[in-house]
Image (cartoon, rainbow, N blue to C red):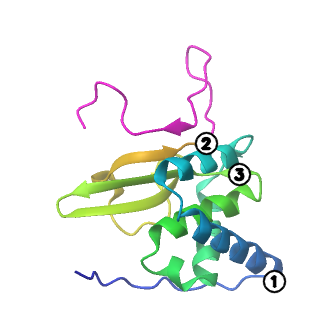
Amino acid sequence: MTIPVAVEPPVSLRWHRNLAARCAAGTARLLIKLPPRRLRQVLAIASRGARPATPGEALDARQAVVSVSLRCAGQGCLQRSVATALLCRSRGRWPDWCTGFRTRPFRAHAWIEADGAAVGEPEDMTLFHTVISVRGRTAPNRAGRRTPPLSDGPAPGGTD
């Protein structure tokens, strides 16, 4: 079964931003061949020490990635999300990287979030259940502890 996908329009990039986006897309192409657990580990290591990406920074990185890679501009959501996260990381930032699914109709997807909202996604992402994510560091909670940057889905005892 094929699903028609509209290719996202490219944006004009300066040569150094174009090169960085191409490197991120190429690296992502290699990383997505890893098993999910190993990919998550690699991205968790990459996210260490980075500040959270703003929605604008994450969107700029996403637009750069889809401008240099036809696969990222089309159906390659996993490569697009990994490349976007890596491009943000090259500037010292990290968006929340997520993968998940929805049930009706069934669809698996990978995306990035900033400030708790999906970035650049045309559909309602609240319908998706997050299965694997690598979250950036967050502000301390009331107990003074930071939320861990690595997540395997909903918290124990959830209804999902």
Q: Are marks 2 and 3 in contact (CB under 8 Å)?
A: yes
> Looking at the picture, how far across and down is residue 2, in whole percent?
26, 82
Residue that numbered label 2 is attached to = 136
Residue type at the position of mark 3: Arg
How dense is the environment of label 2, judged by Cα within 10 Å: few (below 14), some, or many (20 and up)?
A: many
- Determine the residue positioned at 49% across, 82% down: 8
Q: Main secondary structure of the magenta part?
A: loop
- Is disc 2 placed on a helix, strand or loop? loop
Q: Is residue 47 visible?
A: yes
> Looking at the picture, how far across and down is residue 45, in whole percent?
67, 44
| Left or right: 121, with 88 as reference point | left
| Tag count | 3
- Is disc 3 placed on a helix, strand or loop? strand
Up the image or down, 31 lies above or below 67; here it is above
Disc 2/disc 1 C-alpha distance (Å): 28 Å
Residue 136 figure quarter: top right
Residue in front for this viewpoint, 20 or 62: 20
Disc 2/disc 3 C-alpha distance (Å): 9 Å
- Is disc 1 placed on a helix, strand or loop? helix
Residue 93 is tagged as 3
Q: Which residues are magenta?
A: 136-160
Is 46 magenta? The answer is no
> Looking at the picture, how far across and down is residue 135, in whole percent?
55, 42
- Determine the residue positioned at 17% across, 60% down: 104
Residue 29 is tagged as none
The disc, 2 or 3, on the residue closer to the chain's N-terminal end is 3
The disc, 2 or 1, on the residue closer to the chain's N-terminal end is 1
Residue that numbered label 1 is attached to = 15
- Determine the residue positioned at 42% across, 77% down: 75
